[in-house]
């Protein structure tokens, strides 16, 4: 059994150290972490006021101390929503803080009732943190989020345990000034949950930074399509899948015709608009499992997997996709000119598409490129190039 004042001190030190470390990381790398540091610092301030119970007015050691814990949990939920790039619902996030503050003002002299109310409010806020993570599951990469979920679950158990003890009516189990085994478990558990929350948070930020770096390394910054590096990775995987399932895959090599003339006539900004819109239309023409890549300039590649076990059928399916791309790119492009400013250009593009099939690993990537390039006259889209001299 540990003296309760020692437990207060441990929690104050833990909160202060975590807040300082997160603030230091945030100052140099991500200023958003400074708001997290503020939230963790409230843990220290809460336990300072609790330790001063009987020294400072009860309003501060009871109402303000518990309200600060509620504010900390609200900040956690709000920052998680921001981390997931979702707009926080201020009413949902901050309503529990108001409920707790008003309840404690009314229940200043009802100890057991205060404990039950705080247990319920804090548990609801911790559950909101878990729900926030689960709702934004797709936007949160890695395992850091699960550390936060476990920390929130531990907190809920601790909160509900105190509320249940208060309902039982044994004041010694929930009295903050009593040095009991239950208090030791509660306060040490609180410090452990806070440490886990901080670790999970930093892991989440680290994993997001790594994911963004990896994404940038594999994608073209203009069109947001994959680049050569991504194509190489996907080709290797496609070769292995094709060998495993003995199904043909296909590679479509696409070139925009007279693209240089468009750039020369209207500038690179207009050419970039054409590339971005071309990329968007290409993505609409393929399945989610297919890969669309910009090789550079006006060259694009579409990698099709699992077409068919028969070569003729596989070629027919690849040709269907190629014709779908042809039809999509045949629609006029609405481009905005810089001079005269804001004037619109209805541009009709043209392109050539070459198709090459592969099965297993009987052909390497370079040979596949060569065959697709040699077949680039198989499907040729010829339209007038309006606006190009």
Image: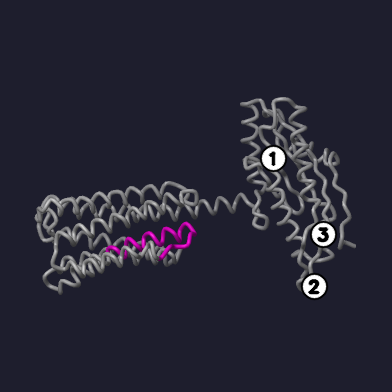
Residue 46 at x, y = what percent? 23, 66
| Residue at mark 2 | 339
Furthest-front residue in this view: 106
Give the SS element for disc 2: loop
Which of pointers 3 and 2 indicates the residue nearer the eye?
Answer: 3
Residue 15 at x, y = what percent? 27, 62
C-beta proximity under 8 Å, tags 3 and 2: no
Real-space CA distance between mark 1 and mark 2, rounded to the nearest whole angstrom: 38 Å
Which of pointers 1 and 3 indicates the residue nearer the eye?
Answer: 3
**The residue stretch that appears in magenta:** 69-90
| Residue at mark 1 | 303
| Residue at mark 3 | 347
State which quadrant residue 129 falls in: bottom left
Mark nearer the N terminus (1 vs 2): 1
Q: Residues within 10 Å of mark 3 (few under 14, many from 20)?
A: some
Q: Residues within 10 Å of mark 2 (few under 14, many from 20)?
A: few
State which quadrant residue 206 falls in: bottom left
């Amino acid at each position: 059994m540990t003296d309760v004042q020692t437990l207060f001190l441990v929690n104050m030190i833990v909160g202060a150290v975590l807040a300082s470390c997160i603030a230091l990381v945030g100052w140099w790398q991500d200023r958003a972490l400074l708001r997290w540091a503020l939230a963790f610092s409230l843990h220290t301030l809460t336990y300072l006021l609790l330790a001063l119970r009987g020294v400072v007015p009860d309003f501060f050691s009871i109402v303000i101390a518990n309200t600060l814990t509620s504010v900390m949990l609200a900040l956690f939920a709000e920052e998680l929503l921001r981390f997931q790039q979702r707009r926080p619902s201020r009413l949902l996030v901050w309503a529990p803080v108001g409920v707790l503050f008003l309840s404690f003002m009314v229940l200043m002299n009802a100890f057991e009732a205060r404990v039950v109310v705080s247990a319920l409010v804090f548990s609801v806020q911790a559950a909101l943190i878990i729900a926030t993570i689960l709702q934004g599951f797709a936007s949160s990469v890695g395992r850091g989020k699960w550390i936060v979920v476990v920390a929130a679950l531990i907190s809920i158990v601790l909160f509900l345990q105190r509320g249940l003890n208060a309902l039982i009516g044994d004041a010694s189990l929930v009295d903050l000034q009593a040095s009991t085994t239950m208090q030791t478990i509660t306060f040490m558990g609180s410090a452990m949950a806070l440490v886990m929350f901080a670790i999970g948070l930093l892991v989440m930020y680290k994993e997001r930074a790594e994911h963004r770096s990896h994404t940038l390394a594999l994608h073209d910054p203009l069109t947001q399509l994959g680049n050569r590096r991504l194509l190489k990775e996907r080709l290797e995987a496609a070769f292995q899948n094709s060998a495993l399932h003995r199904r043909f895959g296909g590679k479509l090599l696409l070139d925009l015709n007279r693209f240089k003339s468009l750039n020369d006539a209207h500038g690179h900004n207009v050419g970039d608009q054409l590339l971005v819109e071309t990329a968007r239309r290409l993505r609409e023409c393929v399945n989610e499992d297919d890969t669309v890549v910009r090789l550079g300039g006006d060259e694009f590649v579409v990698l099709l997997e699992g077409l068919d076990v028969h070569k003729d059928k596989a070629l027919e399916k690849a040709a269907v996709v190629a014709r779908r791309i042809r039809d999509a790119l045949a629609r006029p492009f609405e481009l905005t000119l810089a001079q005269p400013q804001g004037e619109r250009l209805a541009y009709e593009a043209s392109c050539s598409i070459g198709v090459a099939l592969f099965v297993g690993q009987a052909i390497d990537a370079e040979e596949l490129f060569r065959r697709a390039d040699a077949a680039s006259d198989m499907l040729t889209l010829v339209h007038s190039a309006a606006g190009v001299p």
